[in-house]
């Protein structure tokens, strides 16, 4: 979440009048996600507390874990409860910037789809080794345009202008259609949600709704 908010693809819910950064007024820091990370690290640290107690007890039934147990177990449950409340707030009000996601994806898609371009060019009679080497060179040149000069990714244009590939720009763009490159990922996500996530949400619907309502108060 923190990484994607940095890329301006997703954003935590941002309340009216909320301060995003004490130093930079324009920023919207992912404050809830940062709190989740902080609390999660605390819980991980608590687990090391119990391991150290176990290691120093020598498998004896001694009582030197009493004070330790009374602190770390309640703290762990309270911290995880806070994490889940924050997570419920984020997921119920998350903002998705689809156009930014599409722009970022299309900037990288020509690189990620080179194997598909190569396969289609070979099906048209091209020599795989020769085309592979050309794609490698064109990819390096296109990457240089992006990294050194801040220009758009022109890999598609470079390949389309090379008659060796036998592919028009329109054909290449069709090959790079994201729907043609994600395999069964979409179906797998839908199956997982329908078969595993939704049954749990339905089972605990009243509890989940109550928790979300309390978080949003």
Image (cartoon, rainbow, N blue to C red):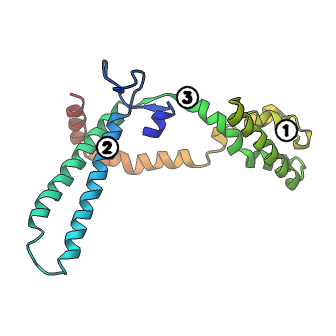
The part of the image, by quadrant, that contains residue 205 is top left
Answer whether labels 3 and 2 touch (C-beta < 8 Å).
no
- How packed is label 2: few (under 14 Cα within 10 Å), some, or many (20 or more)? some
- How packed is label 3: few (under 14 Cα within 10 Å), some, or many (20 or more)? some
Q: Does residue 212 appear left or right of residue 6 in this picture?
A: left
Q: Quadrant of the C terminus?
A: top left
Judging depth in this view, the residue of 173 and 56 nearest the camera is: 56
- How packed is label 1: few (under 14 Cα within 10 Å), some, or many (20 or more)? some
Residue 36 percent coordinates (x, y): 31, 43
Mark closer to the observer (2, 1): 2
Which residue corresponds to the image point at 24% horizontal and 58% vertical from the top-left?
46
Say which element carries label 2.
helix
Residue under pointer 1 = 167
How far apart marks 3 and 1 lie (CA) works out to 28 Å
Mark closer to the observer (3, 1): 3
Kindly tell me whether residue 120 is visible in this rendering. no
Which is nearer the N-term, disc 3 or disc 1? 3
Residue 128 percent coordinates (x, y): 85, 54
Which is nearer the N-term, disc 2 or disc 1? 2
Q: Does residue 208 appear left or right of residue 63 in this picture?
A: right
Which residue corresponds to the image point at 25% horizontal and 40% vertical from the top-left?
85
**Seen from this angle, which residue lies furthest top?**
17
Say which element carries label 1.
loop
Residue 169 percent coordinates (x, y): 81, 32
Residue under pointer 3 = 100
Mark closer to the observer (3, 2): 2
Say which element carries label 3.
helix
How far apart marks 3 and 2 lie (CA) works out to 25 Å
Which residue corresponds to the image point at 36% horizontal and 45% vertical from the top-left?
198
The image shows residue 177, relative to residue 199, as above or below, that is above
Residue under pointer 2 = 36
């Amino acid at each position: 979440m923190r990484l994607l908010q940095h890329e301006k693809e997703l954003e935590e819910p941002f309340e009216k009048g909320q301060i995003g950064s004490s130093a930079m007024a324009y920023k919207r820091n992912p404050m809830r996600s940062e709190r989740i990370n902080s609390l999660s690290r605390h819980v991980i640290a608590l687990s090391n507390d119990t391991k150290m107690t176990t290691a120093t007890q020598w498998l004896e039934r001694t009582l030197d874990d009493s004070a330790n147990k009374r602190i770390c177990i309640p703290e762990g449950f309270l911290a995880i409860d806070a994490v889940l409340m924050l997570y419920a707030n984020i997921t119920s009000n998350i903002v998705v910037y689809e156009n930014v996601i599409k722009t970022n994806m299309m900037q990288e898609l020509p690189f990620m789809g080179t194997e598909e371009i190569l396969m289609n060019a070979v099906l048209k009679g091209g020599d795989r080794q020769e085309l592979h080497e050309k794609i490698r060179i064109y990819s390096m040149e296109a990457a240089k345009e992006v990294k050194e000069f801040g220009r758009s990714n022109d890999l598609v244009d470079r390949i389309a202008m090379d008659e060796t590939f036998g592919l028009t720009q329109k054909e290449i763009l069709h090959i790079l259609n994201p729907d043609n490159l994600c395999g069964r990922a979409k179906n797998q996500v839908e199956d997982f949600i329908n078969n595993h996530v939704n049954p749990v949400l339905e089972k605990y619907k009243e509890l989940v709704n109550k928790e979300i309502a309390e978080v949003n108060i």
